[in-house]
Image (cartoon, grey):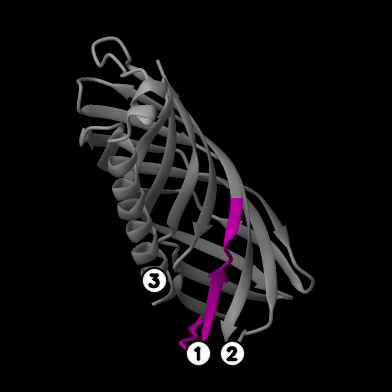
Amino acid sequence: MKRNSIFGLTIAFILSLGVFGIDAGKSPAHASEMTPIDENYAKWLIRVRALGILPDTDSDVNIGGAAAPAAGLDIDDTYVPELDITYFLTKNIALELVLAISKHDVEGTGSLAGTDVGDFYIIPPHLMLQYHFDMGNGFKPYIGAGINYSLIFSEGNAAGFNGLKIDNGFGFSLQAGVDIQVRDNWYFNVDVKKTWLNVDAKTNLGATPVRADIDVDPWIVGVGLGYRF
């Protein structure tokens, strides 16, 4: 429910920006401040965004060789800077590469609630195939679908745990966003992605092995500024 609310609020924000952008586009002063982008040569769009990476975690845990349905592992939210590069194959179709590094804590839930398990770093590049709509007046919403490969490294152990290891994994993503031209080649951007990612994790609580199958499934919400050329 929490993640769905975030998604709904983000989409509502995108739509409200669209209304604002369209209304603003009717103003002569606004139109005189911006130079339309020639789609025939403006192939590249580089953005810097602030990301909220919000895992929607679910897990199956095995402790000491036996299923532990009352126990779970959770991965916390984090907020990081991000760089993304978009290349337009046609006026409307583009490829986007998303690059970021984030750090997350792993915490226990259920019977393990209040337990710090460890932490890890992740590089989760996304390659998205997008369709961009041109609504006029510098308002350009888009949708996309793609894949990501999550490279997980530098796992650390909390007190009482040892040997934390989380496997890398492939995921599938869907995306919706909007670019709003603010001046000449500059665009304000709002973007939301949903990624489905499953990983296996293992650690030891003292000498007792703990194994988990984790659906990370993060929402990735970004706000930033882009330059098209």
Above or below for 202 versus 180: below
- Tell me if mark 1 has few (under 14), some (14-19) or many (20+) residues whose alpha carbon lies within 10 angstroms of its own: few
Q: Which residue is mark 1?
A: 70
Of callouts 3 and 1, the N-terminal one: 3
In front: 146, or 80? 80
Query: At 50% across and 70% down in the image, what residue appears?
Result: 212
Examine the image and state in which quarter residue 9 appears.
bottom left
Q: Main secondary structure of the magenta part?
A: strand
Residue type beneath disc 1: Ala
Q: Secondary structure at mark 3?
A: helix
Q: Is residue 179 visible?
A: yes
Q: Quadrant of residue 187?
A: top left
Measuring from the top left, give residue 153's x and y in whole percent: 62, 46
| Distance in Å between CA atoms under marks 2 and 3 | 27 Å
Please provide the residue range marked out in magenta. 65-79
Q: Which mark is residue 159?
A: none
The label on residue 111 is 2
